Every structure is written in C-alpha cells, then in structure tokens.
Image (cartoon, rainbow, N blue to C red):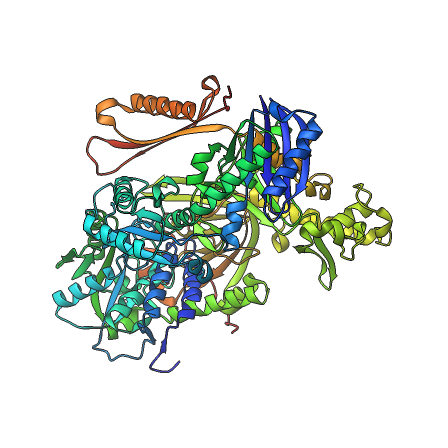
C-alpha cells in the first residue's frame, strides 16, 4: 500500500460487505442496502479513496459518520442518500473546521459502508481504520470514546432535510440517549456525525487497516467459493484466527433484557469436536464461547460463526436449531484490550462479572 | 364432492381424482412444451383410471409452476412500469437496482420515483402529488406500457397512498393493469417492490394461461369450476389468479407438503419431496409448511412474499452418479425427464441414482439385467452417499430436537430406504402424486388486515370483529361456513398513533363449498 492508498472499485463492494458482515460477529446489521447504495454512486462516477493512517498531516480533521435507527426501518425507508453527508457538513460548520476524510465507528456490519457513501458525496477519502475493529451495539463503545474523543458538536440528519445539531453534549452516553430519541422522531432511520477528530488523535486511537482487512476477508471468501475450497479453513488461515469449534446448534434461547435480546446458543460437536459441547452467549453480537464449560473466547475478542459448508456469516437473529457452524476466534486489536477499554467492552461490561478477560493469542496471517 | 387435483411440474403433470378424502385414481403424464396438451392428457388419463364420467367432476384444482418458469426463463414477460412513492426517501436506490440485467431488459427496466410514503408509525413522509403522477402516466402511455407496479414506503402498515395512486393511474390510463405492493409482500421495500413488479410483468401471461386452463378443462367435458392453488396452500378462483399470478410461485412445494400431511395423516413432520432432478425439503407444522423468514430469490431477484421455507438439493431419481477421486459424487446434474431414454435400466448410457436403486433390488423399474455389472460395494457406497445427502437436508429443516418423522413423497421416493438420520421414514400410499393430492385438498381462505382504535372498542371486541370479517371473506370466496377455522391471528400495536391503534390481521380457512 502506498501513502496515497487505493481507490475502491465496484468489484470491491461485494467482498467488502461480506468481510464487514463477518467482522460483525453476529451483529452490526446487514450491509446489503449500503453495498447497493455505494455501488450506485461508484457507477455514477464517484471516487472513494481508502487512505492509510499515515497519509494525512496531524492537524487534518476526520469525521466519524454512521447510520442510526432501527434495522427494520432501514430495509423499508431506504435512505435518500445524503443523510450522513448533511450531518457531517453541519458538524463542520458548528465546529468551524473542514473535514479532510471520513472514518467508520464500526467496520462490522452495515456501518462499514456509510463513511464511504458520505465520502463519495463530499469527494473525500475514507480512512483505513475504524473505532471497534468489529461491531458493538452502542455509540460510546468505540476506541475513539475510550481514548478521549469529544462527543460534541454532533449532528443527526434525516432524508427530508432536517438536521439537528447537538452543540454541547457532556459525553458519549448522553449523545447516545439524545441521538436515539431524535432518530425515532425522524422515522427511526437517520445519519449521525460525531465531533471531528484530529488526525494525530485518530492515528493513536483508531483500529488500523480494518477496511483493507474486511476487503481481504471478503475476497478470500469469494475466491474459496469459486475454487470450491473449504471457506472456513481459508478464512482461518487468512485472518490469523483459530477454529475453536465445529458443531450443530441444538438449542437457542432468547429473552428480552433491558431492550436487548440476550440469550445462549448450545452446540453439539461434530468432526474433530465430536463428543464435546459448546455454548455461546449472544446479545446483538456473540459475547462469550465456552467449550465443555471452559470459557475460551470472550469480548472484546471476535467470535465469528460461519455456516460450516458455505462459510456464510450467521447473524445472531438467524441462529436456529440444526445449523451446522464453525466458530472462529479472532484477536481484537490491542487498543480494545487495555484496562480502560475493558471497562467499556470487556466481559464484565456485558454482564459476566465472573469472567476475567483472557485474550486470544495472535497467529501469523497466511495471504 | 368429486374433485381433480393437478400439479403441473417441470417434468411431470400429475393428476388425482378424489372423492372426499379418498384417492380414487392418480396418474403421471409428461409436461409438454405448451403445458396445455400435458394437462389435457393428464385429465383424460385420470378420468379413465377413475372410471368416472367427466360430468361427475365438481371442481378442478391446479397447481402450476408456469409463472415461476416464465420469470426464470425470461419469456412472455410484459413491459412494466415500476412506480415508487417515497421521495425524498429511497432516492439512493431506483427500482430494479438489484435485478439481473437480462431480466430487467426483458421487462423494459422502466422505473419512476414519486412523492408519498409513510413512516413506520403511519406519519406521512410527503403528500401524494397528483400532477407528478399524471406526468408519469403520460410517460408510461408514450412508452406503450400497459402494466404498472406501485410501491409505497411502509404500505404494509398504511396502504392508502398505493390505492390512491392506483386510482389516479386507472383514470389516466384506462385498461391498464395495476399491482399494489401491499397486496403481495411484507415490510422490506426492495423485496416487496420486486415481488410487485414480477406480478405486474406476468399479468398479460396470466390472462392467456388462465384462459388456456379453462379451455383444457372444457375440452375434456368437465363442467365444474376451476381454481389455482397459491403459496399458502389455499385456492384462488380464476379471476383472482389472473390478477395475482405471483402468488402461485411456490405452490408446488406447498402442495406436495400439504399432500404428504394428508396422505400420511401426520401433521408435524419433515417432508422430503424427491423429483427427477432435485429434492425439496421443508418442515410441516400443523399440516402447513413453515414459512420462510428471509428474502427468497426467484429468477435471481430477491422477493419477500410468503413462501414455504424449502431447501432444495440437486438429488433426484435422474441424478448422475460418478466415481471421483474424493469418493462417489451424486448430482447435481441430472438426466431429468430424459431418464426414460438415458438411464442404464432404460437402455441408455448414463449411470443414475435410479439405476443404483434397481441394482440394489429395491425397485422394479426398467431392465435389471442392464445394471447387473455394478459391484455390491459400489452400490452400497452410493446408497450411503444418497442417505447422507438427505440426512444433511433433513437436519437443516428441523426446528427442534423433537424426533419428528420424515414423510417421503414424489416420484424419486424409491431412493429412500430406512430411517434418515435416525428419524422414522413414512412413505404414504400415492406418494408419487402427493403434490396433486395437495392441490385437490386445498382450502379456501379469507383474510382481514385492519387498524382498530383499541381505546374505543377494546382488544377482545376488535379481535372478534376481525374474526367475523375474515370468516365472511372466506364464505364469499367459496368456503363452507361450518368448516371454517381461524388459523392465524396477529395484532401489532402501532407506536406513536393516538387511541392505542393496533393493526389486526386474521386469516380464516375452510373447505370449498360446492353446490
């Protein structure tokens, strides 16, 4: 990769959305509509350049944008297109700065695509990195917030032209609360832009290279399918992850707790794991994997469920009896593993006080 | 009541005559290129086998894949205009944005975006603009298009804009066919719009096909009425079917699953329908197929109307059997309907699954001497491979660890011997024509979908009113009042609307009433 990064091609969008779905670790929303929107823009001649973290000077401003609302609304009231872009412009105006590039809060799921769409509108590049290296359910669960990014000014925009600016918000928790409320009034599908961050800060706080990582994973999946190779094996080798279990889903239990569907999936081992049992704690995302009652992967490390035969990522809402899945563990970036980060995104923060985060060990990546 | 059920499949046209709950006769005829010749042949053959006179037949029920095939093969599709109401929302993705280019080209690829649409809670995104719609009507007229699909944002919650726009187009373009998306699909704009567009592009074809079925039936001397079966296993009369051809799309698997339940007397099971080329596997709950919850692709287009959740694999009675370095490979290639000339047992040169079954001594078919050279060890491994393929599908279709039985139907049922994955296998009588039986036993339904203000009348009264209305709708569609059951009740509170507004959907189903 050169300092100038690379241009996203139309043929990159499908692999990007596959990689994003996989890094969604069971959540993050479906990137399908976002992929189509980005494809339309690129077909009309928009250029989206992906820039490495060292490409811009320290004093350049980076804008974090993403969709906010209910996933069920997102598939019905499809975006006008410029929602995130208009929110970003309002933030620029209020902060009195010019944004030089966009960045994603989460590379996992549908929000991987929104910064590229806003970038296409603005004629700006997008930064090769994000604030999670995966997907998490709330605005404040980003490395940006964990390492001190400001919440305000922020702005939320709808398809009709309404833009609401949050001029002063004391922290990201308040921003999450206010933005949720406004997004419902806007019809539960809107674009959110958060306070511009300096490039110097982003270089320290962002999980680097995740756009490229998602792309590479997607290309690997498609290539393996085309060559009729074992998709799961190829994904494991090319991500530096490890296969922790293969099994059949024998039970899925869910209950509504605090607005989130929480629950467990039980697996009975097949192949090398015949005779073993596993359990996955799920919320929007996969949180903890136990094999024979021993916790082996836990948040913030990535727990990825792939359909055993096709390698298709399985989201937590479609998990059901009889599916045969491979469970892959992938170490999250070091920025997500500091004591400060674990307070927000560690197992205790997700309701597992008895678990002490035991990180996965990275393995070499096989190209 | 004497009825005939017909299932027009890609390979075979199956027909049965039933007297009440008894199957009098069942036949298989080859599906013909023009479809109708095959239907006439099947009708004549089944009448002959039943020894009944054509005048004895009260009613004919037809399940057909004709419309599905038209989309898959991109033939006989009308130029269609897709009009979407929702601006300024949805502007980022025009209609048909995710269609295969050849299908889009086949129907002209004409799409329009206009104002309208609702929020999830019923609020208006923007008011309808009559002038804008009249301008679109002008353009549609200039392009010589005579069928329109109208889709409005959140129309499954509030369908008024679609109706109003439909009336505007009907006045401006007399004689034009109009499909409203809320009549067909659920929430999920692109998928529902796609289903509506597909329905619209089949409207010219549906008139011809319905007319041809009518002619085929009259030709055999049958005076009774005829119906088409739809995705949910219920009937629609000819006039309705002409308007909603898309609702027949998945009637094939539905009919075979309903037939399997009827013939076996088992209402909760996994059904495996083995044809010549593929096996369809689905799960049966209280006698009805379980519905798919995610988008289903038809002809390369994602749609979301209610279809049975059926999993298909390339395994059938005509599947090729090949020894490879990795072991034995069965399917997905198949000799299909050419099995009668290409399989070894029929003097052909292709080794198929049917050959292996005959060699194993499990079926009397063709000339057994022609497969005498197959080694017992090879036969055994092939059978094991077939059973493991079926076991995988059955596993995927199971919803719980409950040990449900597996009902095996279809012409390729000879492939199955003994339990699948430890589950009991039932092969009912007449298994080869289960889909035609499913068509013959199809019932009549009536549905309501209304919003009630519960602050005014209360939930119990609202549900009672909806059930009455659904029952009346079923009766007026031809159901016998005493047989009507309420099979589906759904009430969804609509947030942010005054008066505790709740959307109530009720479906009533009953036996067809004749006379």
Nearer to the camera, B50 or B505: B50
Nearer to the camera, A91 or B321: B321
Position of B5 with respect to B380 (left or right) is left
Position of B140 with respect to B8 (left or right) is left
Task: List the single residue furthest toward the top.
Answer: B482
The answer to whether B116 is drawn above or below residue A232 in the figure is: above
- Residue A204 spot, x, y in % from top left: 29, 72
Asked whether residue B442 appears in the rendered view, the answer is yes
- Residue B173 spot, x, y in % from top left: 29, 47
Q: Quadrant of the N terminus of chain B?
A: top right
Position of B132 with respect to A43 (left or right) is left
Q: Quadrant of residue A191?
A: bottom left
- Residue A200 spot, x, y in % from top left: 25, 75
Residue drawn at x 40%, y 71% is A212
- Residue B22 spot, x, y in % from top left: 64, 23
Residue drawn at x 30%, y 65% is A117
Nearer to the camera, B194 or B296: B194
Asked whether residue B424 appears in the rendered view, the answer is no
The answer to whether B319 is drawn above or below residue A18 in the figure is: above
Residue drawn at x 70%, y 30% is B48
């Amino acid at each position: 990769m050169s300092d100038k990064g690379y241009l996203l091609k139309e043929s990159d969008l499908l692999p990007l959305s596959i990689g994003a779905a996989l890094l969604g670790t069971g959540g993050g929303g479906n990137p399908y509509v976002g992929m189509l929107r980005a494809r339309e823009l690129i077909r009309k001649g928009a250029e989206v350049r992906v820039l490495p973290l060292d490409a811009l000077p320290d004093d350049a401003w980076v804008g974090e944008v993403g969709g906010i609302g209910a996933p069920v609304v997102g598939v019905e009231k499809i975006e006008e297109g410029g929602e995130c872009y208009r929110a970003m412009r309002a933030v620029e105006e209020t902060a009195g700065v010019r944004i030089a590039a966009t960045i994603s809060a989460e590379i996992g799921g549908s929000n991987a695509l929104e910064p590229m769409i806003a970038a296409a509108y603005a004629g700006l590049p997008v930064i090769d990195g994000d604030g999670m290296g995966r997907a998490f359910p709330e605005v404040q669960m980003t490395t940006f917030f964990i390492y001190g990014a400001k919440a305000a000014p922020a702005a939320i925009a709808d398809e009709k032209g309404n833009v609401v600016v949050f001029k002063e918000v004391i922290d990201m928790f308040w921003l999450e609360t206010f933005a949720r409320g406004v997004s419902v009034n806007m019809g539960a599908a809107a674009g959110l832009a958060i306070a511009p961050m300096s490039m110097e800060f982003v270089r320290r706080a962002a999980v680097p290279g995740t756009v490229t990582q998602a792309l590479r994973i997607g290309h690997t999946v498609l290539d393996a399918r085309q060559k009729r190779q074992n998709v799961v094996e190829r994904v494991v080798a090319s991500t530096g992850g490890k296969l922790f279990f293969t099994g059949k889903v024998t039970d899925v239990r869910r209950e509504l707790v605090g607005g989130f569907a929480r629950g467990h999936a039980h697996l009975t081992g097949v192949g090398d794991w015949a005779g073993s049992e596993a359990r996955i704690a799920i919320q929007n995302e996969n949180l903890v994997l136990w094999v024979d009652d021993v916790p082996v992967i836990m948040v913030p490390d990535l727990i990825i469920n792939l359909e055993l035969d096709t390698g298709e990522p399985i989201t937590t809402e479609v998990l059901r009896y009889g599916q045969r899945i491979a469970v892959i563990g992938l170490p999250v970036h070091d920025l997500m593993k500091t004591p400060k980060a674990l307070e927000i995104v560690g197992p205790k923060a997700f309701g597992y006080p008895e678990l002490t985060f035991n990180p996965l060990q990275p393995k070499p990546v096989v190209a | 009541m004497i009825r005939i059920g017909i299932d027009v499949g890609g390979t075979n046209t199956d027909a049965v005559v039933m007297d009440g709950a008894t199957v009098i006769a069942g036949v298989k005829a080859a599906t013909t290129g023009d479809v109708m010749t095959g239907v006439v042949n099947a009708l004549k053959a089944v009448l002959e086998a039943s020894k009944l006179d054509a005048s004895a037949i009260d009613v004919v029920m037809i399940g057909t894949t004709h419309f599905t095939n038209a989309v898959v093969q991109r033939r006989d599709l009308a130029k269609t205009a897709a009009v979407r109401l929702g601006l300024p929302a949805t502007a980022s993705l025009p209609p048909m944005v995710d269609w295969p280019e050849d299908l889009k080209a086949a129907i002209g690829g004409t799409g329009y975006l206009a104002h309208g649409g609702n929020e999830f809670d019923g609020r208006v995104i923007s008011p309808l603009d009559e002038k804008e719609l009249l301008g679109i009507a002008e353009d549609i007229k200039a392009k010589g298009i005579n069928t329109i699909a109208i889709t409005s944002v959140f129309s499954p919650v509030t369908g008024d804009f679609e109706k109003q726009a439909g009336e505007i187009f009907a006045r401006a373009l007399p004689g034009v066919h109009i499909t409203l998306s809320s009549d067909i699909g659920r929430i999920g704009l692109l998928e529902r719009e796609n289903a509506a567009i597909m329905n619209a592009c089949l409207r010219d074809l549906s008139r011809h096909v319905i007319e041809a079925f009518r002619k085929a039936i009259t030709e055999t001397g049958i005076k009774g009425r005829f119906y088409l079966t739809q995705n949910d296993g219920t009937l629609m009369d000819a006039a309705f079917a002409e308007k909603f051809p898309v609702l027949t799309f998945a009637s094939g698997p539905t009919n075979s699953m309903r037939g399997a339940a009827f013939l076996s007397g088992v209402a909760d099971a996994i059904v495996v329908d083995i044809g010549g080329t593929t096996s369809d596997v689905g799960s049966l709950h209280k006698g009805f197929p379980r519905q798919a919850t995610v988008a289903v692709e038809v002809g390369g287009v994602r749609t979301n109307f209610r279809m049975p959740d059926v999993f298909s694999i390339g395994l059938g009675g005509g599947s090729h059997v090949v020894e490879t370095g990795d072991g034995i490979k069965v399917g997905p290639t198949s000799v299909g309907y050419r099995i009668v000339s290409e399989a070894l047992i029929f003097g052909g040169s292709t080794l198929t699954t049917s050959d292996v079954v005959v060699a194993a001594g499990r079926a009397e078919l063709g000339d057994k001497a022609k497969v005498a050279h197959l080694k017992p060890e090879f036969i055994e491994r092939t059978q094991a491979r077939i059973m493991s393929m079926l076991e995988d599908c059955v596993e995927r279709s199971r919803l719980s660890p409950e040990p449900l039985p597996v009902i095996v139907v279809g012409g390729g049922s000879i492939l199955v011997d003994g339990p699948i994955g430890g589950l009991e296998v039932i092969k009912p009588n007449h298994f080869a024509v289960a889909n035609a039986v499913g068509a013959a036993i199809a019932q009549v339904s009536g549905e309501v979908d209304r919003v009630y203000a519960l602050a005014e009348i209360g939930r119990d009264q609202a549900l009672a009113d909806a059930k009455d209305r659904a029952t009346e709708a079923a009766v007026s569609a031809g159901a016998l009042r005493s047989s009507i059951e309420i099979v589906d009740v759904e009430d969804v509170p609509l947030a942010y609307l005054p008066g505790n507004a709740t959307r109530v959907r009720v479906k009533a189903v009953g036996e067809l009433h004749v006379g």
